[in-house]
Amino acid sequence: MQSQRSQVPTVSASGWLKGYYYVRAAFSLIWVALAFTLGRHVPQVAAVMLIVYPAWDAAANYVDAASNGGLVGNPSQTLNLVVSALTMFGVAAALTQSMNAVLAVFGVWAVLSGAFQFATGVRRWKSYGAQWAMILSGAQSALAGVFFIHVAGGANVPSIADIAPYAAFGAFYFLISAIWLTVRDARRGTIHTAA
């Protein structure tokens, strides 16, 4: 009886995390689709989208931390929240300068948020498992950020289409994590049922 009680929080938390990953994947996929269509041809829409993306990340990190023990107990998500919120304002300011400035801001954000996501994945490994995709995503985000900063210093003027692949990879990793947890939980459910 005691073992059944101890499993309930883990199953509940795992179910919440799956939903969270699916929602984040869906948002990123929609954002990418809009970036390659409407955002690519309407600068005003692109500007709003470039501000919304880090704003959404800040909100998502807040919900994630608040739903899993609070901001104090989740320092990597809390720091990610702060960095994403600052990035939102940084992008808004950079939009008045140039797209190169915007890409540079996104680059710094990608490096920092990638590092915090990596830390979150490592910390969650024991509790949830299936965090390899989040860890890989964090590392790749940091590398993409370095690339963004390098490109931003060049002569070519970037566009939202240059940032969209970064968001697409994020969607891919969130989706993989969600599916991995879904399959794992389904297998556990089958094992428990058979037992």
Image: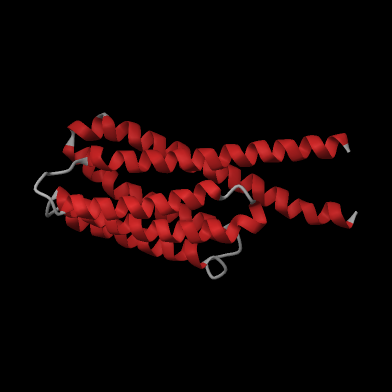
Observer-nearest of 178 and 96: 178
Location of residue 10 in the rendering, given as x and y in whole percent from the top left corner: 71, 53
What residue appears at the point 27 percent right and 46 percent down from the top-left corner?
A: 50
Residue 54, position in %: x, y? Answer: 34, 52
**Residue 164 at x, y percent in the picture:** 30, 39
Write the residue at 45% across / 38% down: 172
Q: Could one spot residue 102 in this view of the protein?
A: no
Q: How many marks?
A: 0
* Residue 116 shown left or right of residue 180 in the figure: left
The residue located at (25%, 44%) in the rendering is 48
Vertical placement of residue 41 versus 24, above or below: above
Q: Residue at x 19, y 49 (%)?
A: 151
**Image quadrant containing the C terminus:** top right
Residue 114 occupies quadrant? bottom left
- Give the left or right position of residue 105, taking residue 14 as reference: left
Q: Quadrant of residue 31?
A: top left
> Does residue 54 appear in the picture of this structure?
yes
